[in-house]
Image: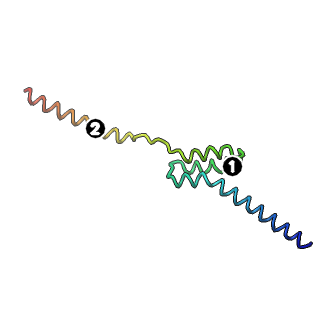
Amino acid sequence: MSGLDYFTWVVLIIIIGTLIVGFVVLASLPGKMAEKNNHPQAAAINMAGWLGLIFTAGIAWIVAMIWAQIKPISSPTYTDDLEALKNRIAEIESRLASSAEVSS
């Protein structure tokens, strides 16, 4: 083998390595962005990024990128609502008790 053959093999190995590293960086990008944004579904976004790039030729990867940027609207918890209702009921009961004392 001549020097040109060795050079060709080195260039081929560098190109293949670059493609592999580029693929890994692109596949993990949505998950890293979601973790950076403290997204509550970061693990699912990470998996969607990998599977989207592997199985759907990048279509689901684009969806994962958009999903990583959109933070879901958090709904109030029911325990907060329950505490607010308990406080409101206690306030109404105290008003009723004080108005019953005034009318008697």
Q: Position of residue 53 (x, y in %)?
A: 69, 49
Q: Is 4 positioned to the left or the right of 104 in the image? A: right
Q: Is 102 positioned to the left or the right of 4 in the image? A: left
The residue under label 1 is 53
Where does the C terminus fall, quadrant-wise? top left
Label whose residue precedes the other's in the sequence (2 or 1): 1
What residue do we see at 34% from left, 38% from top?
A: 81
Instruction: Please identify the quarter of the rendering in which residue 96 is found.
Output: top left
**Mark 2 and mark 1: span between their CA atoms?**
50 Å
Q: Position of residue 42 (x, y in %)?
A: 55, 50
Q: Position of residue 25 (x, y in %)?
A: 65, 57
Q: Position of residue 69 (x, y in %)?
A: 54, 47
What residue do we see at 81% from left, 66% from top?
A: 11
Above or below, 28 relative to 14: above
| Circle nearer the viewer, 2 or 1 | 1
Type of residue at label 1? Leu
Instruction: Give the residue at the far left of this rendering.
Output: 104
Contact (Cβ within 8 Å) of mark 2 with mark 1: no
Report the number of discs. Answer: 2
The residue under label 2 is 86
Type of residue at label 2? Lys
Query: Dot 2 surroundings within 10 Å: few (below 14), some, or many (20 or more)?
Result: few
Q: Secondary structure at mark 1?
A: helix
Q: On residue 17, which mark appears?
A: none
Q: Secondary structure at mark 2?
A: helix
Where does the N terminus fall, quadrant-wise? bottom right
Above or below, 21 relative to 77: below
Instruction: Give the residue at the far front of this rendering.
Output: 4
What residue do we see at 67% from left, 48% from top?
A: 51
Q: Is 98 positioned to the left or the right of 28 in the image? A: left
Query: Dot 1 surroundings within 10 Å: few (below 14), some, or many (20 or more)?
Result: many
Above or below, 91 relative to 62: above
